[in-house]
Amino acid sequence: MQRSSKAMLLSGLVFPGAGHFYLKRWVEGTLLAGTAAYALYFIVSVAMNTALDIVGQIESGAVVADPDVISAHVTQQLQATAGTTSLATIVLTVCWVMGIVGSYWQGRDKVTPNEHQE
């Protein structure tokens, strides 16, 4: 398997920037992985804060422990943060695509003569 294919699979299946690290492109890998990690942290943070807030409301008795009521509260709170989480999701997706495409292109630039015969 060619280095470009391995790098592309690493970026696509593991995490953005993994393919760049495989190709020893430390700066690009660090930028992609760092940006993607921050976006993922933000998305998970919003989801956890929403869940903890609703659990707190259920424990205090402000929200009835009924699945329909809880679902309505979850939907309401997620709609309130939809703009920022959508932006973070777009950033994460762009990083993932850039990681796949970038590692493939950079891997093709580093092709050695032995790889053409594989």
Image (spheres, rainbow, N blue to C red):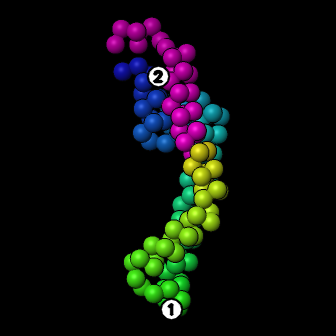
Disc on res. 74: none
Mark 2 burial class by Cα count in 10 Å: few <14, some 14-19, many 20+: many
Give x and y (percent) for residue 84: 65, 56
| Left or right position of 100 against 32 | left
| Residue at which label 2 appears | 4
Chief SS of the magenta region: helix
**Label at residue 61:** 1
Q: Label 1: few (<14), some or many (≥20) within 10 Å? A: few
- Viewer-nearest residue: 46 or 22: 46
* Magenta segment includes 107: yes
Indicate which disc, 2 or 1, sits on the residue closer to the N terminus.
2
Disc 2 or disc 1, which is closer to the eye? Answer: 1
Q: Point out the stretch of residues depicted in magenta.
A: 92-118
- Please state which amino acid type lies under the numbered disc 1: Gly
* Location of residue 24 in the rendering, given as x and y in whole percent from the top left corner: 56, 29
Q: Residue placed farthest to the bottom in the image?
A: 61
Q: Is residue 18 visible?
A: yes
Residue type highlighted by circle 2 = Ser
Residue 115 located left or right of residue 25 = left
Give the x, y percent position of residue 16.
53, 39
Of the pair 11 and 90, the residue shown nearer to us: 90
Q: Is residue 62 left or right of residue 113?
A: right
Distance from disc 2 to disc 1, alpha carbons, whole Å, reads 56 Å
The secondary element bearing badge 2 is classed as helix
- In the rendered structure, does residue 113 fall within the stretch colored magenta? yes
- Residue 116 placement (x, y as % from top left): 40, 9
Point 47% across, 12% down: residue: 112
- Identify whether 112 is placed above or below 68: above
Task: Assign the N terminus to one quadrant of the image.
Answer: top left
